[in-house]
Amino acid sequence: MKKTILYLVVFVFAAITASAQVSTSNQSDANKKAAEQKRMDEQKRLEQEAIKQTNNPNAPVITFENTVHDYGTIPQHADGNCEFKFTNDGKEPLILSNVRSSCGCTVPTWPRQPIMPGQSDVIKVKYDTKRIGIINKSIHVYSNATVPTVSLKITGKIEAPDNTKAPEKEVEKTGTPVNK
């Protein structure tokens, strides 16, 4: 009798555990589907907004002086700051909704307030110059302009510092030598 009850308890426990795993899997799939649907809805909304903006003759127009900044060849740990100056050439206020970089080593900062027609501002970019090698990074600017996404680029090369002289140990020459 005890064995039967023990087997029954083990069977019930196994059934509950298995059903809990199945329901978690179903919830995970449902969460993934909901997140994908939300992403698709957001993308569709942005596309519709872009279509509206291209049809609006008064829409803001973002114009950059330069879309590429070339650092050239710089030493490691040099100043990695640069600026991209832009102007709102449209007839409505320009709003930068987001500015993203292609890598965590590149950090953009941008104006959060609307830029009025005819006014200019800058997007500042800081590149972490402790990495040695070629620089080829993108910064994507999202706005309410007629062209809603603009890509900026930073390029260059970072070289290791020239360490031709080996460090020397400073030795105090006033003491007596010790024999071992």
Image (cartoon, helix red, strand yellow):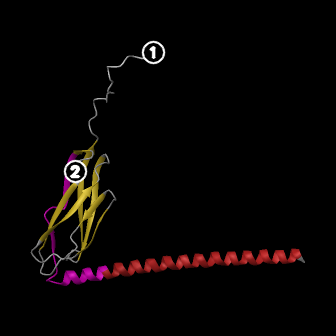
| Residue at (14, 83) in percent of width and height | 58
Crowding at mark 2 (Cα within 10 Å: few <14, some 14-19, many 20+): few
Say above or below: 19 vs 110.
Answer: below
| Residue at (35, 78) in percent of width and height | 43
From the viewer's perspective, is 60 left or right of 141? left
Q: Check disc 1 and give the amino acid type.
A: Asn
Q: Which residues are magenta?
A: 46-73
From the viewer's perspective, is 109 left or right of 178? left
From the viewer's perspective, is 22 left or right of 146? right
| Residue at (28, 61) in percent of width and height | 107
Query: Which residue is label 2 attached to?
Result: 79
Where residue 120 appears, as percent x and y from the top left, is 12, 70
- Front label number (2 vs 1): 1
| Mark before the other along the chain sequence, 2 or 1 | 2
> Do the CB atoms of the residues marked 2 and 1 lie less than 8 Å apart?
no
| Residue at (21, 70) in percent of width and height | 111
Q: Is residue 71 magenta?
A: yes
Say above or below: 72 vs 34.
Answer: above
Specify the quadrant of the image occupied by residue 51: bottom left
Secondary element under disc 1, as helix, strand or loop, is: loop
Q: Nearer the viewer, residue 44 or 64?
A: 64
Q: Check disc 2 and give the amino acid type.
A: Asp
